[in-house]
Image (tube, rainbow, N blue to C red):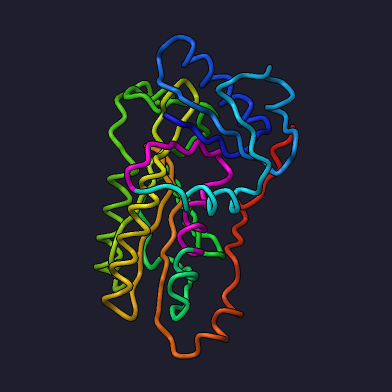
């Protein structure tokens, strides 16, 4: 199994160390680890000795997604390892795919007409809904076990269930979505979570089908763990003036889009 670490700074350095340890202990099947960073020699490269399993890709994340996923199909076993500050990457890739393949559609990120009702929920100005089942500060590398380290009780919540329930709530609130696509970051080794590249490709293919059916529709897109999530309502509307729309639709620019991770 190939793991792709998104960022080679403090988080990526930790993830790389943990994956190598898990592989050495034969606790995890690892065929290759790719560390993607906009720095030519990130911290992870400076702190880890050369290893035949590890490859460093000098690239912006969006560029890497475009190039790498173009070579994959829905049977891919690759796993993306995100940092806490880049949950937007899957959404950004989907939007670029739609713009490239369907230039007659105008894309927008709509505010949510209803919120999930989690203990923490924040609708941000650019369209991101940040939700959490915790109203406390969680450990950075929490593995989200069945017994919550904070409450000391069985964890009864799951953001996957919450996200799909949110899709039903939007339907009832007059903001129906044609599909719910959640990229679920599961913990694979202590402190390391990943989501399958195949989930992105499957979402793209499903959206392709829907865009061929209806001229105006919405999709609920989320990158989640068991406790936390970042959600978006992606609206797509077929228009007539395809040239001007291509020039006015901005690139995805969320406030989580770039946090320097070079420490």
Query: Which one is in front, 41 or 152?
Result: 41
Q: Residue at x 62, y 19 (%)?
A: 51
Q: Which quadrant of the figure contains the N terminus?
A: top left
Q: Residue at x 61, y 30 (%)?
A: 55
Q: Residue at x 47, y 20 (%)?
A: 190
Q: Is residue 226 left or right of residue 257?
A: left
Question: Residue 73, how many percent across, how many down?
Answer: 37, 48
Kindly indicate the quadrant of the structure image that contains residue 255: bottom right
Magenta highlight on residue 203 = no
Kindly indicate the quadrant of the structure image that contains residue 231: bottom left
- Identify the residue at the far bottom of this view: 240
Total number of numbered labels? 0
Question: Residue 10, how many percent across, how many down?
Answer: 67, 30
Q: Which quadrant of the figure contains the C terminus?
A: top right
Query: Which one is in front, 101 or 236?
Result: 101
Q: Residue at x 47, y 63 (%)?
A: 97
Query: Which one is in front, 95 or 173?
Result: 95
Magenta highlight on residue 80 = yes
- Identify the residue at the far top of this view: 25
Question: Residue 113, how many percent across, how many down?
Answer: 38, 68
Query: Which one is in front, 59 or 223?
Result: 59
- Picture layout, residue 79 above or below residue 111: above
- Picture layout, residue 81 above or below residue 99: above
What stretch of residues is rendered in magenta? 74-96
Question: Residue 109, how many percent across, how many down?
Answer: 48, 68
């Amino acid at each position: 199994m190939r793991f792709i670490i998104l960022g080679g700074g403090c988080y990526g350095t930790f993830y790389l160390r943990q994956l190598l340890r898990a592989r050495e202990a034969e606790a995890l099947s690892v065929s290759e680890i790719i560390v993607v960073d906009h720095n030519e020699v990130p911290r992870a490269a400076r702190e880890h000795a050369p290893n035949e399993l590890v490859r460093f890709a000098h690239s912006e994340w969006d560029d890497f997604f475009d190039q790498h996923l173009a070579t994959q199909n829905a049977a891919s076993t690759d796993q993306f390892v995100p940092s806490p500050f880049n949950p937007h990457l899957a959404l950004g890739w989907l939007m670029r795919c739609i713009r490239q393949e369907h230039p007659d559609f105008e894309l927008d990120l709509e505010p949510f007409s209803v919120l999930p009702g989690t203990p923490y929920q924040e609708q941000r100005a650019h369209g991101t809904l940040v939700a959490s089942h915790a109203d406390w500060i969680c450990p950075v590398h929490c593995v989200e076990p069945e017994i919550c380290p904070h409450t000391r009780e069985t964890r009864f919540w799951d953001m996957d269930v919450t996200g799909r329930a949110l899709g039903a709530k939007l339907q009832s609130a007059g903001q129906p979505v044609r599909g719910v696509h959640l990229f679920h970051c599961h913990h694979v080794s202590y402190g390391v979570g990943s989501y399958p590249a195949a989930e992105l490709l499957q979402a793209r293919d499903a959206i392709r089908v829907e865009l061929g059916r209806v001229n105006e529709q919405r999709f609920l897109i989320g990158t989640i763990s068991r406790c936390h999530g970042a959600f978006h309502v992606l609206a797509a509307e077929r228009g007539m003036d395809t040239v001007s729309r291509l020039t006015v639709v901005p690139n995805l620019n969320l406030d989580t889009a770039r946090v320097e991770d070079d420490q």
